[in-house]
Amino acid sequence: MTSIAMGGVSKYFDAGETVANYRLTLEVVDGEFLVFLGPSGCGKTTALRLIAGLEQPSEGAIYFDNERVDGRSPSSRNVAMVFQNYALYPHMTVAENIGYPLRVRGVPPDERDRKVEAVTTLLHIEDQVEKKPAALSGGQRQRVALARAIIREPSVFLLDEPLSNLDAKLRQEMRIELKRLQNELDITTVYVTHNQEEAMSMADRVVVMNQGTIQQVAPPQELYERPRTAWVARFIGSPPMNLFEGTRQNGSIDFGEAGAVELDSVVRAGETDDPVDTTPPEDGTTASVVTSDVQGEVALGVRPEDLTITTSRPTTGNVIEGRVDTVEPLGEYVLVNVTVNDQLVNAKLADGTVSRDERVYLTFDNDDAYLYDENGELVG
Protein backbone atom coordinates (compact mmCIF):
# COMPACT_ATOMS: atom_id res chain seq x y z
CA MET A 1 0.00 0.00 0.00
CA THR A 2 1.03 3.61 -0.58
CA SER A 3 0.12 6.88 1.08
CA ILE A 4 -0.10 10.08 -0.95
CA ALA A 5 0.49 13.63 0.24
CA MET A 6 0.00 16.91 -1.61
CA GLY A 7 1.62 19.93 -0.02
CA GLY A 8 0.53 23.34 -1.33
CA VAL A 9 0.18 22.03 -4.88
CA SER A 10 -0.87 24.51 -7.58
CA LYS A 11 -1.15 24.09 -11.33
CA TYR A 12 -1.26 27.03 -13.72
CA PHE A 13 -1.77 27.09 -17.49
CA ASP A 14 -1.44 29.86 -20.10
CA ALA A 15 1.56 31.48 -18.42
CA GLY A 16 -0.22 31.57 -15.10
CA GLU A 17 -3.45 33.14 -16.36
CA THR A 18 -5.50 29.96 -15.86
CA VAL A 19 -5.50 28.44 -12.37
CA ALA A 20 -6.49 24.77 -12.48
CA ASN A 21 -5.47 23.94 -8.89
CA TYR A 22 -4.52 26.29 -6.10
CA ARG A 23 -2.58 25.26 -2.99
CA LEU A 24 -4.03 21.78 -2.61
CA THR A 25 -2.95 20.27 0.69
CA LEU A 26 -4.19 16.76 1.29
CA GLU A 27 -3.15 13.34 2.56
CA VAL A 28 -4.48 10.02 1.28
CA VAL A 29 -3.76 7.23 3.76
CA ASP A 30 -2.67 3.69 2.88
CA GLY A 31 -5.52 1.68 1.37
CA GLU A 32 -7.99 4.56 1.37
CA PHE A 33 -10.70 5.09 -1.25
CA LEU A 34 -10.67 8.87 -1.77
CA VAL A 35 -13.04 10.61 -4.18
CA PHE A 36 -12.59 14.04 -5.76
CA LEU A 37 -16.09 15.47 -6.29
CA GLY A 38 -17.08 18.71 -7.94
CA PRO A 39 -18.70 20.38 -10.95
CA SER A 40 -17.13 20.36 -14.40
CA GLY A 41 -14.05 22.55 -14.59
CA CYS A 42 -13.39 22.58 -10.85
CA GLY A 43 -9.88 21.08 -11.17
CA LYS A 44 -10.51 17.54 -9.95
CA THR A 45 -9.12 15.80 -13.06
CA THR A 46 -6.05 18.03 -13.03
CA ALA A 47 -5.45 17.01 -9.42
CA LEU A 48 -5.63 13.35 -10.46
CA ARG A 49 -3.23 13.94 -13.36
CA LEU A 50 -0.79 15.61 -10.98
CA ILE A 51 -0.86 12.55 -8.74
CA ALA A 52 -0.36 10.32 -11.79
CA GLY A 53 2.55 12.34 -13.13
CA LEU A 54 0.74 13.25 -16.36
CA GLU A 55 1.04 16.88 -15.23
CA GLN A 56 3.75 18.47 -13.13
CA PRO A 57 2.88 21.02 -10.41
CA SER A 58 3.64 24.70 -10.91
CA GLU A 59 4.39 24.85 -7.20
CA GLY A 60 4.18 22.59 -4.18
CA ALA A 61 5.21 18.96 -3.68
CA ILE A 62 3.71 15.49 -4.05
CA TYR A 63 4.85 12.53 -1.96
CA PHE A 64 4.31 8.78 -2.15
CA ASP A 65 5.17 7.18 1.21
CA ASN A 66 7.10 10.31 2.25
CA GLU A 67 9.21 10.15 -0.93
CA ARG A 68 8.90 13.15 -3.21
CA VAL A 69 7.67 12.15 -6.69
CA ASP A 70 6.77 15.39 -8.48
CA GLY A 71 9.01 15.61 -11.52
CA ARG A 72 9.00 11.84 -11.98
CA SER A 73 7.33 10.02 -14.87
CA PRO A 74 4.07 8.09 -14.38
CA SER A 75 5.88 4.76 -14.91
CA SER A 76 8.28 5.46 -12.05
CA ARG A 77 5.35 6.08 -9.66
CA ASN A 78 3.78 2.62 -10.27
CA VAL A 79 0.29 4.01 -10.77
CA ALA A 80 -2.49 2.56 -12.90
CA MET A 81 -5.22 4.69 -14.45
CA VAL A 82 -8.67 3.90 -15.79
CA PHE A 83 -10.31 6.54 -17.97
CA GLN A 84 -13.82 7.31 -19.11
CA ASN A 85 -13.22 6.01 -22.65
CA TYR A 86 -11.68 2.64 -21.60
CA ALA A 87 -8.88 2.97 -24.24
CA LEU A 88 -8.95 -0.68 -25.31
CA TYR A 89 -7.11 -1.92 -28.39
CA PRO A 90 -9.85 -2.91 -30.87
CA HIS A 91 -7.71 -5.46 -32.77
CA MET A 92 -6.78 -7.38 -29.60
CA THR A 93 -8.84 -9.93 -27.70
CA VAL A 94 -9.86 -9.35 -24.09
CA ALA A 95 -7.00 -11.56 -22.91
CA GLU A 96 -4.49 -9.72 -25.10
CA ASN A 97 -5.72 -6.31 -23.92
CA ILE A 98 -5.45 -7.31 -20.26
CA GLY A 99 -2.06 -8.98 -20.66
CA TYR A 100 -0.53 -6.18 -22.73
CA PRO A 101 1.10 -4.30 -19.80
CA LEU A 102 2.85 -7.53 -18.79
CA ARG A 103 3.86 -8.27 -22.36
CA VAL A 104 5.67 -4.94 -22.77
CA ARG A 105 7.47 -5.61 -19.51
CA GLY A 106 8.74 -8.91 -20.83
CA VAL A 107 6.77 -11.16 -18.49
CA PRO A 108 6.96 -14.78 -19.76
CA PRO A 109 3.80 -16.04 -21.55
CA ASP A 110 3.00 -18.76 -18.98
CA GLU A 111 3.12 -16.31 -16.08
CA ARG A 112 1.18 -13.77 -18.11
CA ASP A 113 -1.57 -16.31 -18.83
CA ARG A 114 -1.83 -17.23 -15.14
CA LYS A 115 -2.25 -13.60 -14.13
CA VAL A 116 -4.81 -12.93 -16.88
CA GLU A 117 -6.82 -15.92 -15.70
CA ALA A 118 -6.71 -14.73 -12.09
CA VAL A 119 -7.78 -11.16 -12.80
CA THR A 120 -10.54 -12.11 -15.27
CA THR A 121 -11.94 -14.48 -12.65
CA LEU A 122 -11.81 -11.70 -10.07
CA LEU A 123 -13.81 -9.43 -12.39
CA HIS A 124 -16.19 -12.17 -13.64
CA ILE A 125 -15.18 -11.88 -17.31
CA GLU A 126 -13.36 -15.21 -17.65
CA ASP A 127 -15.87 -16.29 -20.33
CA GLN A 128 -15.12 -13.21 -22.47
CA VAL A 129 -11.35 -13.58 -22.93
CA GLU A 130 -11.46 -14.62 -26.61
CA LYS A 131 -13.75 -11.78 -27.67
CA LYS A 132 -12.71 -8.41 -29.01
CA PRO A 133 -13.90 -5.11 -27.45
CA ALA A 134 -16.52 -4.49 -30.17
CA ALA A 135 -18.38 -7.63 -29.08
CA LEU A 136 -18.62 -6.52 -25.43
CA SER A 137 -21.21 -4.48 -23.54
CA GLY A 138 -20.24 -1.21 -21.87
CA GLY A 139 -19.99 -2.88 -18.47
CA GLN A 140 -17.79 -5.66 -19.85
CA ARG A 141 -15.46 -3.14 -21.51
CA GLN A 142 -15.15 -1.31 -18.23
CA ARG A 143 -14.22 -4.54 -16.48
CA VAL A 144 -11.56 -5.21 -19.12
CA ALA A 145 -10.09 -1.74 -18.54
CA LEU A 146 -10.07 -2.37 -14.79
CA ALA A 147 -8.47 -5.78 -15.27
CA ARG A 148 -5.72 -4.29 -17.42
CA ALA A 149 -4.97 -1.78 -14.67
CA ILE A 150 -5.13 -4.33 -11.83
CA ILE A 151 -2.85 -6.88 -13.52
CA ARG A 152 0.06 -4.45 -13.24
CA GLU A 153 -0.19 -4.69 -9.43
CA PRO A 154 0.06 -0.91 -8.99
CA SER A 155 0.71 0.83 -5.72
CA VAL A 156 -1.90 3.51 -6.52
CA PHE A 157 -5.13 3.09 -8.49
CA LEU A 158 -6.45 6.24 -10.24
CA LEU A 159 -9.88 6.42 -11.87
CA ASP A 160 -11.19 9.37 -13.89
CA GLU A 161 -14.99 9.31 -14.39
CA PRO A 162 -14.83 5.57 -15.22
CA LEU A 163 -18.60 4.96 -15.07
CA SER A 164 -19.96 8.00 -16.88
CA ASN A 165 -20.56 6.14 -20.17
CA LEU A 166 -22.70 3.45 -18.52
CA ASP A 167 -26.46 3.49 -18.05
CA ALA A 168 -27.94 3.94 -14.58
CA LYS A 169 -28.33 0.23 -13.80
CA LEU A 170 -24.79 -0.62 -14.90
CA ARG A 171 -23.36 2.34 -12.98
CA GLN A 172 -24.96 1.01 -9.79
CA GLU A 173 -23.62 -2.49 -10.43
CA MET A 174 -20.12 -1.20 -11.18
CA ARG A 175 -20.08 0.99 -8.06
CA ILE A 176 -20.62 -2.13 -5.98
CA GLU A 177 -18.02 -4.02 -8.02
CA LEU A 178 -15.40 -1.28 -7.71
CA LYS A 179 -15.83 -0.97 -3.97
CA ARG A 180 -15.62 -4.74 -3.57
CA LEU A 181 -12.44 -4.86 -5.63
CA GLN A 182 -10.84 -2.03 -3.71
CA ASN A 183 -11.61 -3.75 -0.41
CA GLU A 184 -10.22 -7.07 -1.65
CA LEU A 185 -7.08 -5.62 -3.23
CA ASP A 186 -6.51 -3.00 -0.52
CA ILE A 187 -4.99 -0.58 -3.05
CA THR A 188 -4.86 3.15 -2.32
CA THR A 189 -7.47 4.52 -4.74
CA VAL A 190 -8.21 8.05 -5.94
CA TYR A 191 -11.42 8.45 -7.92
CA VAL A 192 -12.75 11.48 -9.82
CA THR A 193 -16.45 12.08 -10.44
CA HIS A 194 -19.08 14.80 -10.72
CA ASN A 195 -21.73 12.29 -9.58
CA GLN A 196 -22.66 12.72 -5.92
CA GLU A 197 -24.24 9.29 -5.68
CA GLU A 198 -20.99 7.66 -6.77
CA ALA A 199 -18.94 9.73 -4.37
CA MET A 200 -21.17 9.27 -1.34
CA SER A 201 -21.69 5.52 -1.85
CA MET A 202 -18.09 4.55 -2.57
CA ALA A 203 -15.71 6.90 -0.76
CA ASP A 204 -14.03 6.56 2.58
CA ARG A 205 -13.61 10.34 2.31
CA VAL A 206 -14.80 12.89 -0.24
CA VAL A 207 -12.78 15.90 -1.41
CA VAL A 208 -15.25 18.59 -2.54
CA MET A 209 -13.65 20.98 -5.04
CA ASN A 210 -14.72 24.26 -6.62
CA GLN A 211 -12.75 26.66 -8.81
CA GLY A 212 -9.51 24.78 -8.29
CA THR A 213 -9.59 24.76 -4.50
CA ILE A 214 -10.59 22.27 -1.84
CA GLN A 215 -13.80 23.32 -0.13
CA GLN A 216 -14.08 20.45 2.37
CA VAL A 217 -12.77 16.94 2.95
CA ALA A 218 -14.81 14.55 5.06
CA PRO A 219 -16.41 11.10 5.19
CA PRO A 220 -19.67 11.08 3.20
CA GLN A 221 -22.07 11.22 6.16
CA GLU A 222 -20.12 13.97 7.88
CA LEU A 223 -20.01 15.94 4.66
CA TYR A 224 -23.80 15.75 4.42
CA GLU A 225 -24.46 16.53 8.08
CA ARG A 226 -21.79 19.21 8.60
CA PRO A 227 -21.16 21.29 5.43
CA ARG A 228 -18.63 23.95 6.39
CA THR A 229 -19.54 26.47 3.71
CA ALA A 230 -22.72 27.63 2.01
CA TRP A 231 -21.26 26.45 -1.31
CA VAL A 232 -20.84 22.89 -0.04
CA ALA A 233 -24.32 23.01 1.50
CA ARG A 234 -25.79 24.00 -1.87
CA PHE A 235 -23.78 21.34 -3.71
CA ILE A 236 -24.25 18.27 -1.52
CA GLY A 237 -27.66 16.63 -1.42
CA SER A 238 -30.44 15.88 -3.89
CA PRO A 239 -32.07 18.28 -3.70
CA PRO A 240 -29.43 20.30 -1.84
CA MET A 241 -29.83 22.26 1.37
CA ASN A 242 -32.18 25.23 1.28
CA LEU A 243 -30.47 28.52 2.15
CA PHE A 244 -32.87 31.25 3.26
CA GLU A 245 -31.22 34.64 2.83
CA GLY A 246 -31.96 37.19 5.53
CA THR A 247 -30.59 39.72 7.97
CA ARG A 248 -29.71 38.80 11.53
CA GLN A 249 -30.03 41.26 14.38
CA ASN A 250 -30.04 40.46 18.10
CA GLY A 251 -30.78 36.76 17.72
CA SER A 252 -33.55 37.22 15.16
CA ILE A 253 -33.32 36.62 11.41
CA ASP A 254 -35.54 38.81 9.23
CA PHE A 255 -36.66 37.35 5.88
CA GLY A 256 -38.63 40.39 4.78
CA GLU A 257 -42.13 39.57 3.58
CA ALA A 258 -41.59 35.89 4.42
CA GLY A 259 -41.39 36.74 8.12
CA ALA A 260 -38.74 36.45 10.81
CA VAL A 261 -37.54 33.71 13.14
CA GLU A 262 -35.90 33.69 16.53
CA LEU A 263 -32.78 31.60 16.29
CA ASP A 264 -30.26 31.67 19.13
CA SER A 265 -28.50 28.38 18.36
CA VAL A 266 -27.03 26.90 15.22
CA VAL A 267 -25.24 23.72 14.25
CA ARG A 268 -21.49 24.19 13.90
CA ALA A 269 -19.08 22.36 11.60
CA GLY A 270 -16.32 21.38 14.00
CA GLU A 271 -13.40 22.55 16.11
CA THR A 272 -10.92 23.45 13.36
CA ASP A 273 -10.74 26.20 10.77
CA ASP A 274 -8.50 24.10 8.50
CA PRO A 275 -10.61 23.36 5.38
CA VAL A 276 -8.78 20.10 4.68
CA ASP A 277 -8.51 18.72 8.21
CA THR A 278 -10.83 15.72 7.96
CA THR A 279 -10.05 13.72 11.09
CA PRO A 280 -13.44 12.81 12.58
CA PRO A 281 -14.01 13.38 16.32
CA GLU A 282 -12.78 10.41 18.36
CA ASP A 283 -15.94 10.43 20.46
CA GLY A 284 -18.12 9.87 17.38
CA THR A 285 -20.10 13.09 17.74
CA THR A 286 -21.42 14.77 14.62
CA ALA A 287 -22.45 18.23 15.77
CA SER A 288 -22.80 20.54 18.74
CA VAL A 289 -25.12 23.45 19.49
CA VAL A 290 -23.56 26.81 20.29
CA THR A 291 -24.67 30.42 20.54
CA SER A 292 -23.45 32.96 17.99
CA ASP A 293 -23.58 36.75 17.93
CA VAL A 294 -23.03 37.18 14.17
CA GLN A 295 -24.95 40.14 12.73
CA GLY A 296 -25.79 41.37 9.23
CA GLU A 297 -26.47 39.38 6.07
CA VAL A 298 -26.73 35.64 6.72
CA ALA A 299 -28.08 32.47 5.16
CA LEU A 300 -30.12 30.01 7.18
CA GLY A 301 -29.70 26.44 5.94
CA VAL A 302 -32.29 23.69 6.35
CA ARG A 303 -32.32 20.35 4.52
CA PRO A 304 -35.52 19.61 2.49
CA GLU A 305 -36.32 16.59 4.68
CA ASP A 306 -36.17 18.77 7.82
CA LEU A 307 -38.87 21.17 6.65
CA THR A 308 -42.55 20.67 7.34
CA ILE A 309 -45.40 22.48 5.55
CA THR A 310 -48.74 23.63 6.93
CA THR A 311 -51.51 25.65 5.32
CA SER A 312 -52.38 27.49 8.54
CA ARG A 313 -49.86 29.61 10.40
CA PRO A 314 -48.44 27.83 13.48
CA THR A 315 -48.64 29.81 16.71
CA THR A 316 -45.21 28.67 17.97
CA GLY A 317 -41.80 27.78 16.57
CA ASN A 318 -39.91 28.98 13.52
CA VAL A 319 -42.19 29.94 10.64
CA ILE A 320 -41.33 31.14 7.11
CA GLU A 321 -44.12 32.06 4.72
CA GLY A 322 -44.16 31.07 1.04
CA ARG A 323 -46.28 30.00 -1.88
CA VAL A 324 -46.33 26.57 -3.56
CA ASP A 325 -44.78 26.62 -7.00
CA THR A 326 -44.93 22.93 -8.03
CA VAL A 327 -45.64 19.55 -6.46
CA GLU A 328 -43.62 16.54 -7.70
CA PRO A 329 -44.78 13.06 -6.60
CA LEU A 330 -41.62 10.90 -6.71
CA GLY A 331 -42.93 7.66 -5.23
CA GLU A 332 -40.77 7.46 -2.11
CA TYR A 333 -41.66 11.05 -1.21
CA VAL A 334 -43.32 14.18 -2.60
CA LEU A 335 -41.07 17.11 -3.46
CA VAL A 336 -42.83 20.42 -2.89
CA ASN A 337 -41.18 23.49 -4.43
CA VAL A 338 -42.04 26.68 -2.58
CA THR A 339 -41.26 30.27 -3.51
CA VAL A 340 -40.04 32.29 -0.52
CA ASN A 341 -39.56 35.93 -1.50
CA ASP A 342 -37.69 35.44 -4.80
CA GLN A 343 -36.11 32.12 -3.81
CA LEU A 344 -37.24 28.61 -4.70
CA VAL A 345 -36.87 26.16 -1.82
CA ASN A 346 -37.64 22.45 -1.57
CA ALA A 347 -39.39 20.32 1.02
CA LYS A 348 -39.54 16.51 1.08
CA LEU A 349 -42.90 15.34 2.36
CA ALA A 350 -44.56 11.99 2.90
CA ASP A 351 -47.56 13.16 0.87
CA GLY A 352 -48.59 16.10 -1.28
CA THR A 353 -51.54 17.65 0.53
CA VAL A 354 -50.83 21.12 -0.86
CA SER A 355 -51.62 22.61 -4.27
CA ARG A 356 -49.97 24.98 -6.70
CA ASP A 357 -50.21 28.69 -5.74
CA GLU A 358 -51.39 27.79 -2.22
CA ARG A 359 -49.99 29.93 0.60
CA VAL A 360 -48.06 27.75 3.03
CA TYR A 361 -45.89 28.01 6.14
CA LEU A 362 -42.54 26.27 6.45
CA THR A 363 -41.41 25.19 9.91
CA PHE A 364 -38.26 23.53 11.25
CA ASP A 365 -36.42 22.76 14.48
CA ASN A 366 -33.42 24.79 15.62
CA ASP A 367 -31.37 21.59 15.86
CA ASP A 368 -31.79 21.09 12.11
CA ALA A 369 -30.66 24.61 11.15
CA TYR A 370 -27.28 25.84 9.92
CA LEU A 371 -26.22 29.49 9.94
CA TYR A 372 -23.78 30.88 7.37
CA ASP A 373 -22.29 34.36 7.54
CA GLU A 374 -21.96 36.85 4.68
CA ASN A 375 -18.77 35.09 3.51
CA GLY A 376 -20.57 31.75 3.30
CA GLU A 377 -18.76 30.28 6.33
CA LEU A 378 -20.60 28.17 8.86
CA VAL A 379 -21.05 30.11 12.08
CA GLY A 380 -20.04 28.37 15.27
Image (cartoon, rainbow, N blue to C red):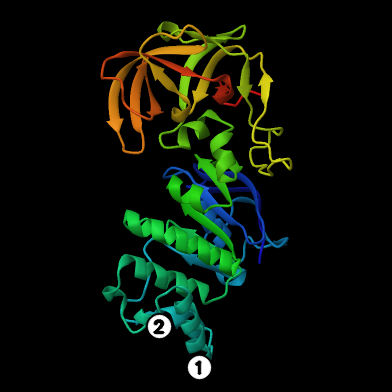
Q: Is residue 205 visible?
A: yes
Q: Tell me if residue 116 comes above or below residue 79 in the rendering.
A: below
Looking at the image, residue 309 lies above or below residue 12? above
Query: Which residue is painted at 37% across and 55% down in the image?
Result: 164
Q: CA distance from mark 1 to mark 2?
A: 13 Å
The percent coordinates of residue 229 (x first, y second) are 56, 30
Q: Quadrant of residue 30?
A: bottom right
Q: Residues within 10 Å of mark 1 (few under 14, many from 20)?
A: few
The amino acid at mark 1 is: Asp
| Residue at x 29%, y 14% (from the top left corner) | 358
Identified at 48% across, 27% down, the residue is 306
Callout 2: helix, strand or loop? Answer: helix
> Considering only order in the chain, which callout, 2 or 1, is on the residue closer to the N terminus?
2
Quarter of the image with the N terminus in it: bottom right
Viewer-nearest residue: 141 or 12: 141
Question: Quarter of the image containing the C terminus?
Answer: top right
Task: Classify residue 365 as left or right of residue 120.
Answer: right
Report x, y in % for residue 183: 57, 64
Residue 43, which numbered label? none
Q: What residue is disc 1 on? A: 110
Expressed as whole percent of the image width and height from the top left, the position of residue 99 reads 46, 82
The picture places residue 214, in percent across and down from the top left corner, at: 57, 41
Q: Which residue is mark 2?
A: 95
Could you say whether the residue bearing mark 1 is in a helix, strand or loop?
A: helix
Q: Is residue 267 above or below residue 135?
A: above
Left or right, 149 with respect to 188, comes to left
